[in-house]
Amino acid sequence: MAVGIVWVAMRYDPPMAVRIVLALLLIMPISPLLDRIVFRPVADASVLLLLTVSVALHFALVGLGLLFFGPEGVRTEPLTAFSMEIAGIHVSGQTILIVVAAMVFSGLLFLFFDFTLTGKALRATAINRTGARLMGIRPARSGTIAYLLGSLMAGVSGILIAPVNTIFYDSGFLIGLKAFVGAIVGGMTSYPGAALGSLGVGILESFASFQSGAFKDVIVFSLLIPILLWRSLASAHSEEEVEE
Amino acid sequence: MTRSQIRLMVAAAALSGYSPWVGLLLAIILTCGIAAILGFVTLRLQGHFLSLSTVAWGLAIAFLFGNIDELGSHNGLSGIPPISIGSLALVEGWQIYFLIWGIVAGVLVLLYNLLDSRIGRAMRTLRGGNTLVESLGISAFQIKLLTFVLAAFLGALSGWLYAHLSRFISPGPFDAGMGIEYLMMAMVGGSGSILGGVVGAAIVTLLKNTVQDYLPLLAKGASGQLEIVVFSALFILFLQRARQGIVPLLARFLPEPKRSRPQPAAALPRREQPAAGTLLLQVKEVQRRFGGLVAVNNVSFQVRSGEILGLIGPNGAGKSTIFNLLTGALRVNSGEIAFAGRPITRDGQCRIARAGIARTFQHVKLRPRMTLLDNVLLGTHSRTKTGLLAGALRLNRAEEASARYEALRQLERVGLGDKPFELAGDLPLGNQRVLEIARALAADPTLLVLDEPAAGLRRQEKLKLAELLRSLRTDRLTILLVEHDMEFVMALVDRIVVLDFGSKLCEGEPAAIRNDARVQEAYLGGVA
């Protein structure tokens, strides 16, 4: 099927909307498949091991990315030519599209996790695997759904960002890392929190690069530490214990 | 924890244009110093905050070094002199080869000694959680910081060797990718063992070279990109098949090392026990709230030296909260607690443990992969003094022998003395509880506080436990028991304090409590 999709895309040069759908169709099965091959055999292992496995997987994917796409970056044409001025600042249609998409998908995720049985089952599995299993939830299926969602989000984000930034085979890592930082600053479990956190990271980075381009990342990552300290002290922790 | 400190070392070695040995000294001082500062700030963090902040430090420092021209920025520094011993300069690879292996062997021996000593045991216990570590009178933060600085020291040493081996350094080999590769080496070898690091490093390096050598034969042209893919795939496959790493996997097939029972040795110093009947613990109008819920409301009681006091009450009466307040796991909102005439209301768990209150846990907290003897040895931590260096150099033989003998004696005292080298995780629950008591006894406590020691035990085990506790009372130990098994408590204790809905209901001897109408109502519902 994947070959078919690529063939259609190459042969007929379809309109943008069709291409987006095709791209999503191509991307969405990737992470559930990886989940099945890579993670499920070690699903009950320690967090450290899972982390190491995912890092190794990251390396493998970056290597494949380099192999398939080469070292040159890709930039797509904007989805919309629309642009407007707000209070004297030029805002492109693409930017508005990104913000709107972020809000729409946050809303959809909120509805999914809070009001559907599948969403609730996913949350239950995240909190306690064994408990969820006893209630008739299959952790493997929850995993597949979670990865499918992740794939979808990644695909949509990629489509949205490609016209703004040149995307290289390894662009995902730094974007992902900063998004993770934003989510942690925002408290991990809240959509407005994550949005605000990511916004904060972005603003911090912009100001830092304005002050000193070379030290941009130094400033971003060292300012992160006081924030992490504050977050860690502010959130109550239950005793962590490593099972052996 | 990532070894971001290694990068600091690189700068230090490069900065000193003098003799490499001066560089080594500077590197160690600088790296350890900076690690201590970083650790001091960061190690209070918990869970993913801690791991994320080490990543943040790592990235921030890497970018910083890459942008300082004096340190060669991203291009690096070249022309670093070789190490020379006397007049012999170690220029050739094979010359420095022996120096490196000598240092590796030395470090392995020192680390092995260290992990088998007092500080090392505390380090191995860190993964059992802060509550366990602190309840043994060990400051978890101190041990974490020590571990962090020790890692920095080793980082400095290896960075120094690396700089003078390649005689050129740049931030490149010290970026996040390398940190991850070190992590992989540890995982492949077995992150729980010292030898695992060396074996893992060897396997990863050899594997990488093999893939580099043979891949071009299989896939021409694209081998550069495929290398990392094949390497990562092999690594994932390995972790799926052998999670523990290679060394623990092979260690199973080795014959059991011969370990001899500890021999009689000089006794460890003992605490002065107060005379029987003196006021030992005074709890005065203690209150603790959780939000709007008052879990413990103005409770007062006293424990006198030499008695067994039972703290009972139905579920949700506030027993466990009181227990946590006494041991410092929770802070009181108001009221006072005094132990042996000294207020301990504001003290943390570690200080309270050191003052002479030893505890056990309702959900057993042992180190399952450590032997019975090692588990009990943990209890002697606050009675012994061996530091990091003395432990690594084995200057602690006399004290270690005393501590080991003491641990064996406590094992014998509770009836577990016949197999001191069994793993704690292999014991049935009843004996695990008893092992916790032995560990508490090894701290030579004035007051022993037991959190539901009979929970989950079978009848025979309960009888044996009661017998053990009675024998401890004859040894003049004071025991505070939190329990809701009435039969167990009634036959054992001298006095009982009954709690209900966070308040003290009554206090008295078992027989009187048994006939008290209020207690019957609390336990059985209204007397119709």
Image (spheres, coloured by chain):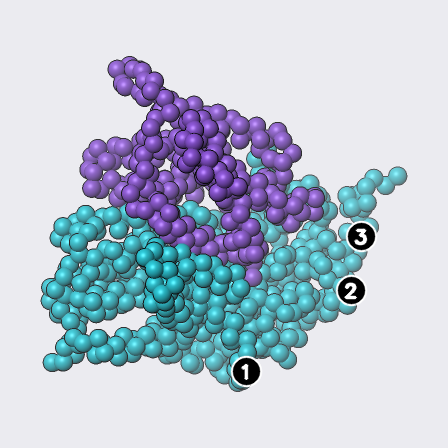
Give residue A94's quadrant in the image. top left
Q: Do the residues labelled 2 and 1 touch (CB within 8 Å)?
A: no
Foreground residue among A133 and A54:
A54
Q: Is label 1 in contact with label 3 (beta carbons under 8 Å)?
A: no
- Quadrant containing the N terminus of chain B is bottom left
- Decide: few, some or many residues near mark 1? Use Cα within 10 Å; few <14, some 14-19, many ≥20: few
Which residue is located at x 54 percent, y 53 percent? A37
Query: Closest to the observer: A160 or A66?
Result: A66
Instruction: State whether residue B267 appears in this view.
Output: yes
Residue type indicated by callout 2 = Arg
x, y (%) of residue B306? 63, 64
Question: Residue A107, percent across and down?
Answer: 51, 26
Q: What percent of the width, then of the height, locates residue A55? A: 42, 53
The residue singled out by tag 1 in the image is B255
Q: Is residue B92 above or below residue B473?
A: below
Q: Looking at the image, is mark 2 or mark 3 earlier in the sequence?
A: 2
Q: Mark 2 points at which residue?
A: B459
| Residue shown at the point (31%, 20%) measured from the top left | A91
Q: Chain under label 2?
A: B
The location of residue B351, given as percent across then percent down, is 47, 57
Chain in purple?
A: A
